[in-house]
Image: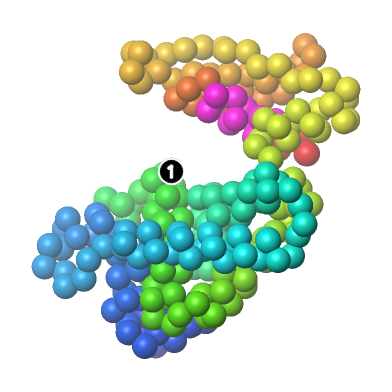
């Protein structure tokens, strides 16, 4: 079994045009080192896949739930955001078959790699749609994406971490979390903020980010883990 056949087995899809599948796996950085590679990168397929994914998810939510538009929008966002798609792509085991530059291939733990995985997953959806059509795309998205919805609803993952931590803190302890800037470092155009989140006088967790809001979100995420919420 060659590499593309392995990817087809992972996806549960046999492509008519193997080049469409191959192109979905090509990151832009690979072409910088292989300018003679006969296919382009996967960003156009990603563009297509993003639209297909959003429509399939939107149709499913519309047909199966009578909730207000705002709630459905939040649920959809939780299903199609980069973190969710990254985790799905990583769990599928597609990562070893991506075409990456040597530098990107080594940088496996970075935030950039997470975006590469999320974008590759959308590109694969685009490739399935282009090669197979609407129904096989729906089957794929239902199998790997929509299956995540019950967990998202149960754990309220459609709420941002700050909202989730605040709701849990108020429910369990009757306290509203407060955030305190611990430090600011770096020049104005590239500051790093360290923010702590407190329940009453107790510091629960500290987060770091390029803005106060980003640091607060990181702190809230860590606090949810720390408190087991």
Q: Residue at x 28, y 79 (%)?
A: 19
Q: Quadrant of the N terminus?
A: bottom left
User: Magenta region, mostly helix, strand or loop?
Assistant: helix
Residue at horizontal 52 percent and vertical 20 percent from the top: 212
Does the magenta run of residues contain 215?
Answer: yes
* Quadrant placement of the C terminus: top right
Asked whether, in this view, residue 124 is left or right of residue 228, the answer is left
Q: Is residue 109 above or below residue 10?
A: above
The reply to whether residue 99 is in sight is no
Report x, y in % for residue 127. Answer: 39, 73
For the image shown, how many numbered marks are present on the structure? Answer: 1
Residue nearer the viewer, 127 or 217: 127
Tell which of 34 and 54 is nearer to you: 54
| Stretch of the chain drawn in magenta | 213-223
Crowding at dot 1, Cα within 10 Å, few <14 / some 14-19 / many 20+, comes out as few
x, y percent for residue 172: 88, 30
Decide if residue 69 is in sight here: yes
Residue 217 placed where, x, y %? 60, 30
Q: Is residue 61 magenta?
A: no
Query: Could you tell me residue 140's position as x and y percent?
Result: 55, 74
Q: How is the image coloured?
A: rainbow
- Which residue is at the front of the view, 214 or 16? 16
Q: Is residue 208 above or below residue 109?
A: above
> Residue 136 vs residue 102: left or right?
right
Asked if 88 appears above or below 143 in the picture, the reply is: above
Residue bearing mark 1: 111
Quadrant of res 143: bottom right
């Amino acid at each position: 079994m060659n590499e593309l056949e392995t990817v087809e087995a992972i996806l549960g899809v046999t492509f008519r045009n193997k080049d469409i599948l191959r192109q979905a796996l090509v990151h832009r950085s690979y072409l910088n080192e292989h300018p003679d590679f006969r296919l382009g990168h996967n960003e156009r397929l990603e563009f297509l896949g993003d639209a297909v994914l959003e429509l399939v998810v939107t149709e499913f939510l519309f047909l199966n739930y009578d909730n207000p538009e705002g709630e459905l929008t939040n649920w959809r966002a939780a299903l199609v955001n980069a973190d969710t798609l990254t985790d799905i792509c990583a769990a599928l085991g597609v990562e070893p078959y991506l075409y990456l530059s040597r530098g990107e291939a080594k940088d496996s733990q970075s935030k950039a790699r997470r975006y590469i995985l999320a974008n590759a997953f959308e590109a694969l959806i685009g490739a399935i749609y282009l090669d197979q059509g609407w129904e096989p795309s729906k089957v794929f998205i239902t199998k790997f994406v929509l299956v995540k919805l019950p967990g998202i609803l149960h754990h309220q993952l459609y709420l941002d971490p700050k909202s989730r931590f605040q709701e849990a803190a108020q429910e369990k302890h009757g306290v509203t979390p407060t955030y305190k800037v611990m430090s600011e470092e770096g020049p104005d155009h590239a500051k790093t903020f360290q923010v702590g989140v407190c329940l009453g006088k107790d510091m629960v967790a500290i987060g770091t980010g390029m803005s106060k809001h980003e640091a607060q979100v990181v702190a809230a995420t860590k606090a949810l883990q720390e408190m087991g919420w």
